Image (spheres, rainbow, N blue to C red):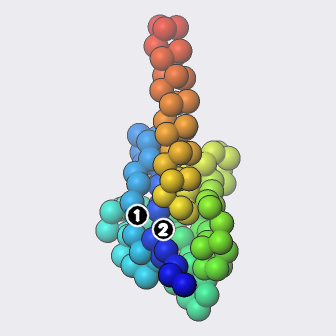
């Protein structure tokens, strides 16, 4: 049996848009090179995400069990201060579906704001 060890991470940036990267689970600690405000540590059977939040500028920490991450289609981590989604981790197709949905909603909101000016 062959397991797909690829995992996709979508992380909000300072412009409230998602940056997306797909990497092997075994290279997850090196994904930080693409995200300046993300640190990833793997300890035993856990993955720890440390994020310098681009939305509230505070540090947030998230801990997941690796097997849970591989079993689920997607995990969502949010800004604990603003209560908004901050990052998505999981299967590429599910992540891209959610990112496209958020981007579309934000685009519609921006259009509505611009028409009010």
Q: Which of 5 and 51 is in front in this view?
A: 5
Which residue is drawn at the image coordinates 39% and 79% (left, top)?
27
Which residue is drawn at the image coordinates 44% and 65% (left, top)?
38
Tell me if residue 24 comes above or below residue 9 in the rendering: below
Q: Where is residue 61 in the image (x, y as percent from the top left)?
A: 60, 68
Which residue is drawn at the image coordinates 50% and 81% (left, top)?
2
Residue farthest along the front direction in this orientation: 1
**Dot 1 corresponds to which residue?**
22
Q: Which of 48 and 117 is in front in this view?
A: 48
The quadrant of the image that shows the N terminus is bottom right
Q: Can residue 60 be seen in this view?
A: yes
Label 1's element? strand
Alpha carbon separation for disc pair 2 and 1: 6 Å
Which numbered marker is on residue 90? none
**Dot 2 corresponds to which residue?**
7
Mark 1 and mark 2 in contact (Cβ < 8 Å)? yes
Number of dots carrying numbers: 2
Residue farthest along the bottom direction in this orientation: 44
Residue farthest along the left direction in this orientation: 33
Q: Can residue 58 be seen in this view?
A: no
Q: How crowded is mark 1: few (under 14 residues within 10 Å), some or many (20 or more)?
A: some
Q: Where is residue 66 in the image (x, y as percent from the top left)?
A: 60, 79
Q: Position of residue 7 (x, y in %)?
A: 48, 68
Label 2's element? strand
Which residue is drawn at the image coordinates 56% and 88% (left, top)?
43
Q: Which of 3 and 67 is in front in this view?
A: 3
Tell me if residue 81 comes above or below residue 66 in the rendering: above
Tell me if residue 62 comes above or below residue 97 in the rendering: below
Tell me if residue 79 comes above or below residue 32 in the rendering: above
């Amino acid at each position: 049996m062959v397991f797909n060890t690829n995992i996709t991470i979508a992380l909000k940036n300072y412009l409230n848009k998602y940056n997306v990267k797909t990497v092997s689970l075994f290279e997850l600690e090196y994904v930080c090179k693409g995200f300046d405000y993300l640190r990833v540590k793997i300890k035993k059977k856990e993955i720890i995400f440390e994020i310098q939040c681009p939305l509230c500028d505070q540090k947030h920490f998230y801990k997941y069990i690796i097997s849970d991450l591989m079993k689920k289609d997607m995990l969502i981590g949010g800004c604990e201060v603003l209560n908004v989604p901050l990052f998505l981790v999981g299967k590429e197709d599910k992540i891209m579906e959610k990112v496209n949905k958020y981007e579309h909603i934000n685009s519609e909101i921006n259009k509505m704001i611009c028409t009010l000016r």
